[in-house]
Amino acid sequence: DRGRSGLFQYDLHSGALLRKIALDNQPRGNLLNDIGLSAPGDVFVTNSERGAVSVLRAGAEALVPLLPEGTLPYPNGIALSEDGARLYVAHARGIPWVDPSPGQHTPVQAPPGMLLSGLDGISLYKGSLLGVQNGLGRGRIVRFRFGANPARIEREEILESGNALFNIPTTGTVAGDSFVYIANSQMRRRGPNGELLPPEQLDPTVLLQVGLEDPQSP
């Protein structure tokens, strides 16, 4: 099944599958990865294997390219600004912001020495970008703070690093004033042929959260 991927819509109350948009693996595989939602109902999704970003417009029945194949090296996390004007996409070597309409992309700027690569899931929170940085050695949770320019990061904060519970931490989301994320994805816990191990051979899933409110906030 490697290379086969799809977009699925579920009813959260009943668990019922409402619809699916399946992609085949021709001429090569797909990997739909992370999702960003707009207020009007557009669904933006990264296709990591093909280096692309696609969009399912509200009311549409098919995914269409926003950034064509090969545009970004392994795009992963994705997050839409509150005003819907900028779509941030984390890829293997950095973070660009994308215009959600025409799909033009521009690299997010940062001070020298600040690493914007290796990020998995990303989220936006009160003028900052949160991410799980698991592609650069020890896993860590980072917060990048924007200044007046939403296309330039001014400083970073390490919210968590090297936690003993980490086993390839991965995608998180903002819940209130906390960032909740998966601490132990166990993505390398597979059999010799890549098959999933039986549940009894895996560790219980661990979710962690880190507070986001500034100390000076009321």
Image: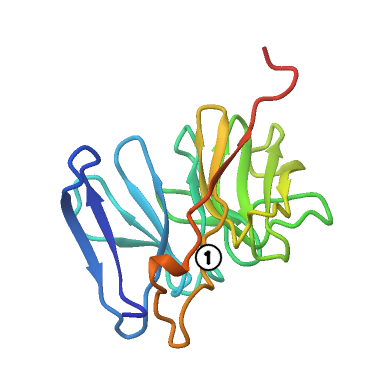
**Up-down relation of residue 104 to residue 59 (above or below):** below
Give the colouring mode of the picture.
Answer: rainbow
- The residue that appears at 74% across and 21% down in the rendered structure is 215
Screen quadrant of the C terminus: top right
User: Given the current orientation, which residue lies at the most extreme right position?
Assistant: 112
**Up-down relation of residue 51 to residue 44 (above or below):** below
Number of marks in the image? 1
Residue hosting label 1 = 186
Residue 88 visible from this viewpoint: no
Q: Closest to the observer: 100 or 56?
A: 56
The reply, left or right, for residue 168 in relation to residue 187 is: right
- The residue that appears at 63% across and 31% down in the rendered structure is 211
Residue 191 visible from this viewpoint: yes
- The residue that appears at 53% across and 69% down in the rendered structure is 74
Q: Amino acid at mark 1?
A: Gln
Q: Residues within 10 Å of mark 1 (few under 14, many from 20)?
A: some
- Which element carries disc 1, helix, strand or loop? loop
Q: Position of residue 134 (x, y in %)?
A: 64, 61
Q: Position of residue 184 (x, y in %)?
A: 55, 57
Q: Closest to the observer: 123 or 193?
A: 193
The picture quadrant where one finds residue 29 is bottom left
**Up-down relation of residue 214 to residue 152 (above or below):** above
Q: Position of residue 94 (x, y in %)?
A: 65, 60
The reply, left or right, for residue 143 in relation to residue 69 is: right
The picture quadrant where one finds residue 168 is bottom right
Q: Position of residue 178 (x, y in %)?
A: 57, 32
User: Given the current orientation, which residue lies at the most extreme front position?
Assistant: 200
The reply, left or right, for residue 86 in relation to residue 26 is: right
The reply, left or right, for residue 81 in relation to residue 95 is: left
Screen quadrant of the N terminus: bottom left
